[in-house]
Amino acid sequence: MAIFALGINHKTAPVALREQVAFAPEQVSQALRELTTLTSITDAVILSTCNRTELYFNGSQSQAEQVIGWLAQFHALNSTDLQPHLYLHQDSAAAEHLMQVASGLDSLVLGEPQILGQVKQAYNQARNAGTINPQFERLFQKTFAVAKQVRTDTDIGANAVSVAFAAVSLAKQIFGNLAKVRVLLIGAGETIELVARHLQEQGAGQLSVANRTYERAVLLAEQFAASAITLSQVPQQLAEADIVISSTASTLPIVGKGMVEQALKQRKHKPMFLVDLAVPRDIEQQVADLEDAYLYTVDDLQSIVAQNLTNRQQAAEQAKQMIAVGVAEFAQWQTLQGNADWVRDYRQRCDAVRNELLAKAVNQLSAGQDAEKVLAEFSVKLTNRLMHSPTKAIRQLVQDDELNKQNMINTLLDL
């Protein structure tokens, strides 16, 4: 049985198609049971995130084709439309892919940490569904160990590689503990939502959200226990803000130099950190001329992100070496398991021969036959039966007259 990794991700398909093959969390257990029942595979894990849907399973090539058909059928899709966007990795390539995914090397944002938790969740769901057996138990435990090593021993996740994260990282460097820092977020789109999430993760607890549409500000504020205001209230709120981060679609600046100057006077020139993530700009460039205002634009952050991305790519090369070792160790374990099965089967066959001949000898003794003759016959037949297949194979091997094969025979037979 081979190990397969079948999937579709942000590299192979647009979001419109990825949405159609995604599994909701409440679907996974039933899907695993259905998959294993219909295809007769025993090990199966479903990993479904916003950027990928992947199925890890063991089986034959024909079963892999069945899994593709099942995936399309489960989501009511035409398999011919789905097939061009799928990738299928086998054995060591499948193990390598899983370890790269768990380590963040295959993510949209290189090194992002959330994926490891998502892989662990997928593994736990499969365990609860009864579709994790010894081979996959070993594979996923090895994967978790490698991913942990990558996180611990490289800088794969140490540097910000998005402008939103870079903005929050800068704020963290300047203020240290963000728990008592007051933050004003201007805008309510995806970028500001991401900034708010990073701020929350870093311990910020005093957030305000300003937006042209008040209802949209309220919706975003509710997610992060923040307060909501309108854009017209920004001048009054500005004096209370230690950090201002803005990202709107406005064509004209929202925060002007005079507005910030007035706020700084009210703050008695307590420093203010401002980040403008908008294009066109939300904050007038002249704000940077004010003595107690520290303004960063999206271009400033992009240079930080570019350098950090280079650092992460260097860390990714280190991570790939660790993954290669992990894949080799798992392959070695598989080989040992295969050898253990071979030894077990051989012993069982020898035991069956012995039991057969021993039962015959016991019957002969019970019938009153001479014990010495019975034992002699038993020993000769046992020796002949056990030696027949090995000696036949040895004759075929030595015909090739290869030294390495003769050495192997000598080793096996202890000659």
Image (tube, rainbow, N blue to C red):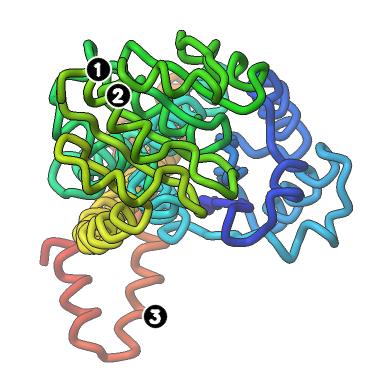
In the displayed structure image, the side of residue 329 where residue 105 appears, left or right: right
Q: Position of residue 340 (x, y in %)?
A: 32, 44
**Residue identifier under label 3:** 396
Q: Position of residue 389 (x, y in %)?
A: 42, 62
In the displayed structure image, the side of residue 271 where residue 23 appears, left or right: right
Dividing the picture into quadrants, the one containing residue 208 is top left
Question: What is the C-alpha distance between the residues marked 1 and 3?
Answer: 96 Å
**Residue identifier under label 2:** 263
Quadrant for the C terminus in the image: bottom left
Q: Residues within 10 Å of mark 3 (few under 14, many from 20)?
A: few
**Residue identifier under label 1:** 266
Dividing the picture into quadrants, the one containing residue 125 is top right
Residues marked 1 and 2 touching at CB (< 8 Å): yes
Q: Earlier in the sequence, mark 3 or mark 2?
A: 2
Q: Amino acid at mark 2?
A: Ala
Res. 145 mark = none
Q: Earlier in the sequence, mark 1 or mark 3?
A: 1
